[in-house]
Image (cartoon, rainbow, N blue to C red):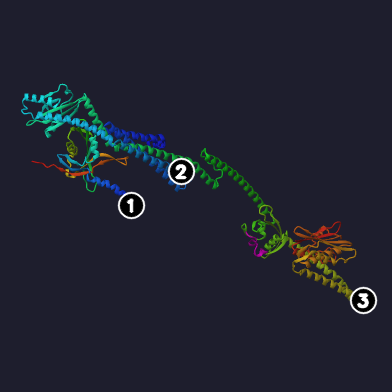
Amino acid sequence: MLRLALSLLLVLLSTPLAADRADEAKIENLSAVADEGKVTVRFSLVNGLSNGQMVEALESGLPTSFTYIVEIFRYRKNWFDAGIARARIEVICTFNSVTREYLLNYRRDRKLVLSETYTDFPTLVARITNIEERDLFEIGDRRPNRLKVRVKADLMRGWLFYVVPWEVSTRWQETRVKAAVKTP
Amino acid sequence: MSFRDGFRRYRKDPRFIITVPLLILAGTSIVYYLIQETKQLTPEALSSQVLLFVLWNINLLLILGIAFVLLRGIVKLVFERQRGILGSRFRTKLVVTYIATSLVPVIVLFVVATDLLRVSIDRWFTTPVRTILENGHAIAQMAQDQAVGIAAGAAREIASTPGSTDPEEMDAAFVHVLRFHGVQMAGIYRDGVLLKLQADPRAPLQEISEPPPRFFEDVAERGTATKIDVAASGGTWVRHAVRMDGGPEVAVAGVYIPNAMSRRLTQSTIEYSRFLQLYSQRQTLKASQTSLFLAVTLAILFGTLWVSIYASRRITIPIKALAEATETLAEGGYGHRVEVVATDEVGRLITSFNEMSGQLASQRRALTESNERLDSERAFMQTVLDSVATGILTFTDSLALLSINRAAMHMLQLEEEPPAKTALGELLRGDLSPLADALDDLTSRGGRAREVTLIRGGELRYLELSVARLGGGDGGWVFAMEDSTQLVQAQKLAAWNEAARRIAHEIKNPLTPIQLSAERIARKFENGDADTTQAVEEGTRTIVFEVTQLKRMVDEFSHFARMPAVHMRHAQLAEILQQAAALYRNAKPGVTVSVSVASDIELLMDPEQISRAVGNLLKNAVEATESGEIRVSARRAPHRVVIEVADPGRGVPDSDKEKLFLPYFSTKGRGTGLGLAIVHRIVNDHDGRISVHDNHPKGTRFEIELPA
């Protein structure tokens, strides 16, 4: 009886997880290139707006934020990684239903870097989900091939049993830092 | 005062317990607010987020508080139960009952209330409301789209005007679009800079700013762009741009929606947006309301839990104190008081307990004092008993030893004091068994005194026993033993001295006439006297007579020495006394013998021996009486029968009374002195006692007491 109940509970818990996995938001096309001691990071958020609730919130005029956490660290096999730097990139969108414009504020480490308005939703989505941060980290004389960059996106907040809050985030995606190819 | 000391001092202060979490909550809420503020949220969203955070933290604090109080209480109760602390089981039951009675209704109420709340929130977004708002919004959008269409038509016409570089043609085109398309403004931009503008003078053109560079970038990218601006007057400008053919210029046409219409369109749009915002936040709304309910529920549970533990402690503390006091009392702690203050029934119970404990203590003191007094008296008595020469033994009714004094131990030659409750047969065995038989006989037959002869360690001992019942309590027996060995030996020595003297005297008395007769016969033969024959006859007769006397005396001695054993049987005393008296009724002229005895007195005795004893007394009485009546009588007395022989003779001097029953003592000139000794021996063999008294008005009275 206990086994049956546990199995049922496992099935109930695993079903929504499995369902979510198909259109799961994730970080793709992550690249990190080091050039002259500075690292440029590029990545894309896939399925970031596949969640109907998120689009709903965005279209309603609520400020909707996409927060990207970017970390660079020294990878050490069989030992703890050594963190070097961390950046927080926030893209906050607010739709003005009267003027039909999307206000996009782009912040890095809580400082406003860019504020733009968009009238075209696909352009807006492309701007939100495709991030290119030039010279995001300074690595000095560190050898790039020993470093890694990882990224995750915090998308929205959900509620468990209407009581316990939890953040909907992508999984960490990481890549090795590559040295820039010098062109003659 | 260090931080640790301060924490120890205030950690149980309710103000400290309440204030510190509230301060932490307030601090974290402010930090959270500042963080959220940077996210450019709307005031409603910001307040909602902060409220949720505060509620969540309150819930967290309450859950932690409940968990702490509950776990602490459970751990304490488990430890107390394991250590067997009194009252822990009762407290456990109380707390469980409190929690169970409050937990179930509170949780049911929480579940029902939150479910109702969620249902009611869902009802806010029912289809009719949504439809109305959507339709209003759609109408507003259509109105805006219509304005956009008009502006787009006008812009396209301007952009498609051939020869757009000709100012006159452009003016004509502007007039045409203003007049026929119904737009309020038309213009041409190059690189974001206005080249030409024509507008309806009634439209508030001054209220809108120039389009931003992004507007022209969109036109450059996609060929067209639309911009909607709300003017300060409340009207709405709808501008549409189209890239002009073959050049960098951009044709822009604008439609102004007047204030009255624009406000309504804007309101519809805003309200619909608010509806959508609310709808998209419904989960958060439910969460905030559920959290609020949860906070209230947890607060109630926390309060109930705290109150239950506090109340159970209030109830169990006096009960625990009472239980512990009862144990203390049971372990002998008389006078122990319960100092816990209680005002209810338990308080009365404590008062009663304290009174009872006090009474027990005072009674215990009195009992102890009484016991000490008894011990003192017992020690005194023991000292007295140990100091007397008489052996004293006390036994229970079942003849188990209670006490024995030092003299008794010495008489019985016991090296150690036997343990209490030793049985009589076990204590007095072997050489001492005659004593045990005598004691057993005395207690079973009701005798009072007995002489016992013991051979202990090769020594002959004469003990005189007397017995008496112990008064009060469970009864029992007390035996007194007098060691009369030396006395008896002295008496025997004296008696033998007397006997030797008497025997010598008795032998000497006939020897003198024998000697004289023999000397006379010899002298007559020597002298040849004529009366020799007569002298021989007379002398011979005298010698024969005296020798006969000597023989009779030897026979009596021999008879005394060979007293037969007693053969006890039941017999009528009257018959025996009558037979004995009959022998002496006519023994002496002027002397009569009368017998007065009840015919129903039956005794366990040797009839021949008793008859002989009474006969000896009567013989002495007849010899001592010149004339008068000798009375023989018998009467019943408690546990005995008393036989009396009284004569009106010359009596016995007091100095002779002590020696009267010794062998060979006689007050008569020619007696053997064995008659009364034989009587004394017969009476002793019957466990009886014989005594001599003066008879009134004169004479002697003998009393024989035989056990009945």
Q: Which mark is residue B501?
A: none
Subunit of mark 1? A
To which residue does mark 1 refer? A4
Give the residue type at disc 1: Leu
- In the image, taking residue A160 as reference, residue B169 lies left or right, namely left
Q: Helix or strand or loop: what does disc 2 sit on?
A: helix
To which residue does mark 2 refer? B94
Subunit of mark 3? B
Distance between the Cα atoms at labels 1 and 2? 36 Å
Q: Are marks 3 and 1 in contact (CB under 8 Å)?
A: no
> Could you tell me which residue is drawn at 67 percent across and 60 percent down?
B411
Give the residue type at disc 2: Leu
Range of residues picked out in magenta: B422-433
Asked if the stretch drawn in magenta spans residue B429, the answer is yes
Q: Helix or strand or loop: what does disc 3 sit on?
A: helix
Distance between the Cα atoms at labels 3 and 1? 156 Å
To which residue does mark 3 refer? B534
Foreground disc of the pair 3, 1: 1
Image coords of residue B299 (percent x, y): 39, 37
Image coords of residue B315 (percent x, y): 48, 41
The residue carrying pointer 2 sits among few (fewer than 14), some (14 to 19) or many (20 or more) residues within 10 Å by Cα, namely some
On the rendered image, what quadrant is the C terminus of chain A found in?
top left
Subunit of mark 2? B
- For residue B276, say whether it is visible: no
